[in-house]
Image (tube, helix red, strand yellow):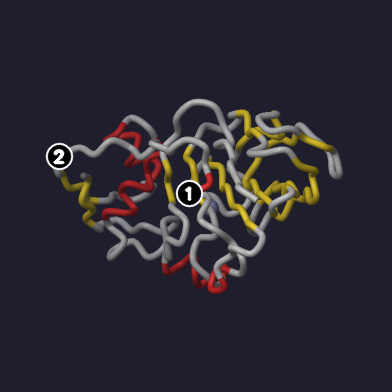
Amino acid sequence: MEVKIIKPFKGEFPISQKFGEAGEWYVKIVGYPHNGMDFAMPTGTPVLACDDGVLSYADNVPDSDGLGINISHEWGLSQYWHLSKLAVKYQEKVVKGQKIAESGATGWATGPHLHFGIKVNGQGLPNMRGWCDPSPFFDKVITTEPPAENNPRSHTVTRGETLWGIAVKYYGKGYLWSRIYEANKKIIKNPNLIYSGQKFLIS
Ligand SMILES: [Zn+2]
């Protein structure tokens, strides 16, 4: 069957981590590369069901997914993590586009974002434990990458600073911290741990 899903939110939010991206620290903790897409969005943003289905899992796992749910679909399942609030109950039927939760930053999250993953029956990647890249299954092309700027600057970290705080300083938006992380992956091993004296490229 042809799978056509909608993006699980209204409006535009930047992709803060793509499917399959293998942050060293992430692989170390999870055991394999990123199994979904992360969209940076403020806590409380309505999260929508990507297709018709039934809520087949709802739990709060503080050490990893945070508050998370799965929806079973005819074609497989979709998964939503780091939520702040649920709007549906376990085993409840949902329709495409229905509000199922509000986004948040529960579990392993450096900042507020939605982790969205799918498993399409028969199309899962073996090295990703059955997870698929959601991008080709959306009904519309997702164009939510943060705009590139072309005046590189550098920032020297001072005591007590966070990637979030540095992103606010340069971009005006804390959730764009991943841009700094992406540009400085050689230096930043774990985005939760940055040290005074480190010099980051701000692109
Ligand atoms: Zn994620």
Q: Quadrant of the C terminus?
A: top left
Instruction: Name the spot of residue 115 as percent of width and height, x first.
Output: 56, 48
Label 1 sits on a secondary structure element that is helix
- The amino acid beneath tag 2 is Asn
Task: Looking at the picture, tell me which residue is in the foreground, 194 or 93.
Answer: 93
From the viewer's perspective, is residue 18 above or below residue 187?
Answer: above
Crowding at dot 2, Cα within 10 Å, few <14 / some 14-19 / many 20+, comes out as few
> Residue visible at 80% across and 43% down?
54
Task: Looking at the picture, tell me which residue is in the foreground, 174 or 34.
Answer: 34
Label 2 sits on a secondary structure element that is loop
On residue 136, the disc is 1
Mark 1 or 2, nearer chain start? 1
Q: Name the residue carrying label 2.
A: 150
Q: Residue furthest top?
A: 11
Instruction: Name the spot of residue 191 as percent of width and height, x first.
Output: 41, 56
Mark 1 in CB contact with mark 2 (< 8 angstroms):
no
